[in-house]
Image (spheres, rainbow, N blue to C red):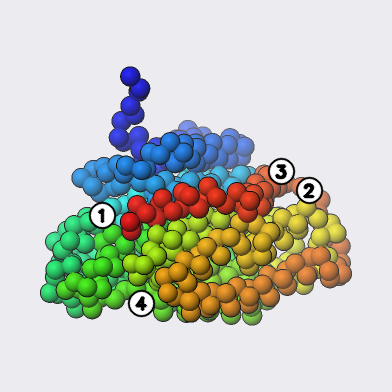
Amino acid sequence: MAFQLPNWMALAPTLALGLTALVLLLVDSIDPDTTDRGLLAAIATVGSLASAGFAAWYLLAGTGDQPFTLYSEALVVDTMALFFAFVFASVTAMVTVASYDYLRDHAYQAEYYALVTLAATGMTLMAAANSLAVVFVSLELASLPSYALVAILKKNRGSVEAGLKYFLIGALSASVFAYGISLIYGVSGSLVLPEVASSVAQTELTGVLGIGVMMVLGGFAFKTASVPFHFWAPEAYEGAPAPISAFLSSASKAAGFAAAFRVMTVAFPVAAVAEGAAASVDWVLAVQILAVVTMTLGNFAAATQDTVKRMLAYSSVGHAGYALIGLAALTGNNDTFVLAGSMAHLLVYGFMNTGAFLFIALTEHWSIGRRFEDFNGLASQAPFACAAMTVFLFSLAGVPVGGGALSKWFLFAGAVGAGFWWLAAVGVINSALSLYYYSRVVKAMWIEEASGEFAIESRPAGLYAALVTAAVVTVLLLPGFGPVWEFATEAAAALVA
């Protein structure tokens, strides 16, 4: 008879990250003055890879085909939870490897790696949360370490200011989110998502419900850096250590979308808000407006920036607008396709955007400036790193050099299939605009003449390893997009089928 794992082992990706954080805190408690950077980075990386390995194993074995519900249905482990757990753990592994070199001269290294893995633990719980209470707790578990990570460069005024702003805006959005949950509980009498859905379909308190849904949507807008709660993102990404910018703009953003996908589709299904007593609570229309404004504002702001890191920060706002299409085009006609498009895009985005910010970490390691002009002629000194950055940027724009082209194509095709051709058209126009500002970096690196000598005296192994991994996966996701799409479709079907 085959050995049967206990049900709680379905949370292995989350447990691996949580245990890794505890081990790091234990090491720090035993030897608070440890300077063994290799040991700390290795523990964090092994834990992250173990989490990614569990998620990949369960996906391939079909563990999520029959969802596991745990702790009185507060958590559910299905294909979507495992799909996003793989994204979070993969990004965390690249960030911890890159941080080995980036943190060479910094203090609080054990705390740094523990906070990263704790935040990742919260993100995996967000994807598996089946109760609004768990959504809130896991969101805070992911957010609180993130505030500290942004401000971890205590002697850097920009880092401390960014951390403070991020914390204050985060506290405000958490209050809004919690108040929205309380209103929904008052209407439905439950916090478990399927029970909320069955209650709201028959409620007469549509006004209270509508305010509650909009406030919850506002909480997700903060976590995904969507308009109007986007303005923390450029400040936080610019002030934070570059690996943390990569972590927040990729994994943290994907976690916000994972929770939003589950809450909005399971607790407030489109059929209920379109036909039942709650028909006036049209959150889909609100998301459509949110998607258009977010992608347009993010891309136009990115096009006007003077520094590359800030340009990437605003472009991540634009990508939040693309991912919102997965919710904005839910009509009941093509839901699985369009939602799968957003999920697949978030997976590909996790690698290409992380890689772009890790390239910024590399240039900061070399003390190269942040302006576009500071990158002039850099390819003559670091051709491999610049080639990787070129792949990331063109893939982010949707040029077929990486998986970003196919993920965008499927996302926009899903919107057209659902009858929202205008939403896809706005996305295409914004992608064309993004090609302009991404090309500015490529032009500076490869075509412009260097105005001075670069002080490139070392090739940091950790940063290069993470950069190579991100570049290789981004390129391979173009011919190997099939499995990604297959798992994304299964993940989406678990929510809307």
Give the mark toward the camera: 1 or 4. 4
- Number of numbered callouts drawn: 4
As drawn, the residue found furthest toward the top would be: 1
Label 3 or label 1, whichever comes before in sequence order: 1
**110 relative to 456 in the view: left or right:** left
Give the mark toward the camera: 3 or 1. 1
Q: CA distance from mark 3 to mark 1?
A: 43 Å
Label 2 or label 1, whichever comes before in sequence order: 1
- Badge 3 amino acid: Ala
Tell me the residue that label 3 is attached to.
461
Tell me the residue that label 2 is attached to.
458
Q: Position of residue 170 (x, y in %)?
A: 40, 66
Q: Quadrant of residue 300?
A: bottom right
Mark 1 vs 4: CB contact within 8 A:
no
Tell me the residue that label 1 is attached to.
131
In the rendered view, tell whether residue 109 sits above or below residue 236: above
Q: Is residue 433 visible?
A: yes
- Badge 1 amino acid: Ser
Tell me the residue that label 4 is attached to.
286
Q: Position of residue 23 (x, y in %)?
A: 45, 35
Q: Residues within 10 Å of mark 1 (few under 14, many from 20)?
A: many
